[in-house]
Amino acid sequence: MTNEEADRTCFVVMPYGQREVSLGDRKVTIDFDAIYEEIFVPAIESVPLAEGGTLTAHRTDRERYAALIDREMWRAIEYSRLALVDITGLNANVMMELGHRYRARPSGTVVVCQRGTPSAFDLNNVRWFPYEYEPADRAEASRAELREIVRETLERNVLDSPIQRALDLEEANARVEALKLDAANAVRQGDRVGAARHLAEAVAVEPANGLLRIELGLLQKELGHWPEAVEQFAAATDRMPSHGPAWRERGIAENKLFGKGKGDADGESSLRRAIELDEEDFDALASLGGVLKRAKRLEEARDAYRRSFDVSGGNSYPLLNHLVLEAHLAGKFELDAVRRMQLQRAAIQRAPQVQHDPPYDAPWSHFDLAQIRLFLGDVAEFHRLGGEAVAHCTARWQVDTFLDTRRLLVDGGVELDGLEDGIAKLEELRKALPEEK
């Protein structure tokens, strides 16, 4: 078979002659030669080629001996533009030839069988097309259906080999792991832009990987690239609709983008979905508090922060926001013994994070500890830690997140020593930070 002939050929792999096969719970004798001539050939040879003419059906009718298959047989299996493989009866030679075709060609293989053919484990991930050769009206319907299947397979030319798919997946996995390692190394070197670029390449290799998209979204979030972050988190929730953290991060990013006047969703729906999936997700609850606070639904926001603090086991972020909103709504800041003890415990948790080299959870650990010191009356530490926090920020939005809540105290008429001076100092320091996209 020449290359030109192969380009116009649909090679048919099937049993030959009359064979007894099992179809369901019955054994039947089938004339496969008649099926080839009356069903397969008319269907195949009515399929037009883009370059003109039609496909040609071809089948090798030579005697086969154990372990010996003619060289031309292998060439036809490997090089024919299409192959139609009839696995009725699960004939050993047919299955061997199908395996060779799948290894040789990533696309262009159509698998058919008669109804009742038992399942084969190795073909569980392969789509089979059933056909019938009797009575006459069913034979005609099968011819028409097979013609459309062959025509569409020829036109679409998509990957249909499970072997090639597995090998491609293995190669893709190796590529993704290498890119993830490059991203991790870039983060260690402080190059978050480079890390995001590596992860974007990994997502392009494996677009259905929701966890990979979350990882990229988190980097975009750190960089203040909110449209890109929303895109990645939304894609992650599409692929993992029951994954609470994906909904939480989507809601956080949507809210940030909405606050900049660039998004339609404010994040509330996504955050409520995250909480529905995990009622103990204190971060989602605290973020919901942020959405409600932005919407001026301050009592609801206060309650969300309180619930977040309760389920978090003492996390400083929801505690501090809850105290701010309580003070704003009351017009004054007061600490009872319980609240003072909670703040002191929060300071014990945050102080080692700030002192760690490099600091853990910067700049948020610094911002939280700064506010704790303010509430406990240590103005000098509030100013010092606020300055350190800004030094660890990568974009202005991080400072703005902190300042927006502190301004609620001023707007509520709450008087605290050092508060307004501290806000002014942070506003000046933020000017040196880059604007986010």
Image (cartoon, helix red, strand yellow):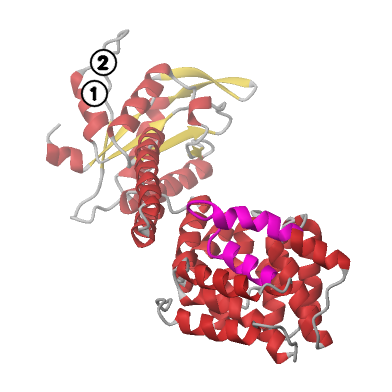
Q: Position of residue 277 (x, y in %)?
A: 73, 56
Split into 4 quadrants, where in the image is the N terminus?
top left
Q: Looking at the image, can residue 276 be seen?
A: no
Q: Nearer the viewer, residue 354 or 134?
A: 354
Is residue 359 within the magenta segment? yes
Is the C-beta separation of discs 1 and 2 under 8 Å?
A: yes
Q: Residue at x 36, y 34 (%)?
A: 167
Q: Main secondary structure of the magenta part?
A: helix
Which numbered disc covers residue 69? 2
Q: In the rendered view, tell whether residue 144 sits above or below residue 227.
A: above
Chain part drawn in magenta: 345-373
- Residue 391 in the image, given as x and y percentages of width and height: 46, 69
* Labelled disc at residue 321: none
The secondary element bearing badge 1 is classed as helix
Q: Is residue 299 left or right of residue 176?
A: right
Disc 2 secondary structure class: loop
- Residue 275 shows in the view: yes
Q: What residue is disc 1 on?
A: 73
